[in-house]
Image (spheres, rainbow, N blue to C red):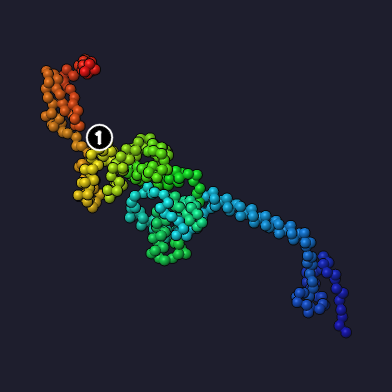
């Protein structure tokens, strides 16, 4: 008869690690594959309930953290391209530089999207683009070229919640002021469009709202370009190439001659310039005044008395000059004019 060993009670802490090999038990029950029951003790039901409640609370807290991060713009979202409305705002960028766009496409193809765009929620699965128009356009171009929806079918975005429409326009302008060298015409155009859309009440508030952080002198020049934008927008093919000097001269001439815009529009239509240089030549010829040469000015001087000459000035004015054109003559002229 086989010699039997005494079995140690279940759960005995003194049980050696290899005790299972020495025990002679009936290992016919599937629930005891090692030949003994082990030390499992089922927790009380109240412990199960407490654990489940704690897990649920943790999940709810995590969901709330994620929701707050999403709504406050601290979570990067991956949005399908067809859910993002690119023309939600009137864009300040008129034309794209082909070389810059090609470089952006190459960068996205090689490294993927590194910087998220900014969007605002418009409804279920609908978003309006605030900033990042070039990145969105480049991703759509890559999707069309490659058909790779997994790689280029979505755009990384941060969700913004502007309190009013002007905040969205400011966000767009501020990003482009940092990233893109906008022309004075493009800056003035977004001011005009924002006023037209009712985002701002007038030009002054739009200039201060959109470009409040730029130097005052630059903001004044943007305001001067508004005259050019409202007179010629839509008729120019290369408005972003208008230089600061030409634009300011055009603004001054248009304000002095209300009929000038009609002449400029007619000339642009007749010439139909195909290049930026040709278009600027038309604007320069009609929109600026050449400074008369010294020889021409000398011919217009008229001697009215010994030591005193009358000179015609560009624009219809005149001036007195000569040895007798002194402070005393000026005082007498002022007295005479006040008596007329």
Give percent across and percent down for residue 249. 26, 38
Horizontal side of residue 223 vs 263, given as left or right: right
Position of 138 relative to 335 (above/below):
below
Any part of residue 158 in sight: no
Q: Nearer the viewer, residue 168 or 158?
A: 168
Label 1 sits on a secondary structure element that is helix
Closer to the camera in the image, 216 or 60:
60
Residue 136 makes an appearance in the image: yes
User: Which quadrant is home to the C terminus?
Assistant: top left
Question: If the image is split into quadrants, where does the N terminus sit?
Answer: bottom right
Query: Which image quarter: residue 138?
Result: bottom left
Residue at x-position 32% and y-position 38%: 224
| Percent of width and height locating residue 255 | 27, 36
At 85% from the left and 71% from the top, the residue drawn is 8
Seen in the image, is 36 located left or right of residue 288? right
Q: How many marks?
A: 1
Residue at 61% x, 55% y is 63
Bin the neighbour count of mark 1 within 10 Å (Cα to Cα): few under 14, some 14-19, many 20 and up: few
Q: Position of residue 139 (x, y in %)?
A: 42, 59
Q: Is residue 136 above or below residue 301?
A: below
The image position of residue 184, as x and y in percent, is 33, 42
Query: Residue drawn 38% across and 36% down?
Result: 204
Q: Which residue appears farthest toward the bottom when viewing the image?
A: 1
Query: Circle 1 sits on which residue?
Result: 256
């Amino acid at each position: 008869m086989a010699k039997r060993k005494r079995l140690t009670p279940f759960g005995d802490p003194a049980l050696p690690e290899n005790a299972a090999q020495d025990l002679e038990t009936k290992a016919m029950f599937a629930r005891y594959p090692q030949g003994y029951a082990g030390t499992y003790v089922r927790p009380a039901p109240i412990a199960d309930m407490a654990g489940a409640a704690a897990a649920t609370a943790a999940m709810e807290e995590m969901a709330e953290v994620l929701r707050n991060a999403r709504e406050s713009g601290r979570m990067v979202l991956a949005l399908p391209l067809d859910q993002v409305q690119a023309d939600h705002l009137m864009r300040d960028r008129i034309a794209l530089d082909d070389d810059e766009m090609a470089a952006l496409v190459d960068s996205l193809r090689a490294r993927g999207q590194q910087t998220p765009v900014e969007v605002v929620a418009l409804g279920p699965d609908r978003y309006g683009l605030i900033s990042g128009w070039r990145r969105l356009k480049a991703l759509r171009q890559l999707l069309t070229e490659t058909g790779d929806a997994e790689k280029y079918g979505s755009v990384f975005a941060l969700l913004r919640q502007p309190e009013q429409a002007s905040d969205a326009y400011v966000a767009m302008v501020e990003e482009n002021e940092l990233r893109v060298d906008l022309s004075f015409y493009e800056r003035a155009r977004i001011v005009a469009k924002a006023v037209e859309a009712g985002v701002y009440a007038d030009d002054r508030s739009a200039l201060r709202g959109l470009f409040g952080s730029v130097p005052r002198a630059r903001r004044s020049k943007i305001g001067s370009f508004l005259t050019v934008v409202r007179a010629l927008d839509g008729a120019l093919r290369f408005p972003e190439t208008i230089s600061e000097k030409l634009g300011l001269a055009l603004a001054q001439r248009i304000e002095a001659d209300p009929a000038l815009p009609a002449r400029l529009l007619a000339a642009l239509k007749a010439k139909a310039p195909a290049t930026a240089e040709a278009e600027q030549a038309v604007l320069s010829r009609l929109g600026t005044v050449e400074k008369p040469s010294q020889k021409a000015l000398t011919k217009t001087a008229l001697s009215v008395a010994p030591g005193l000459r009358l000179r015609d000035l560009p624009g219809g004015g005149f001036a007195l000059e000569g040895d007798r054109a002194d402070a005393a003559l000026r005082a007498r002229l002022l007295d005479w004019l006040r008596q007329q």
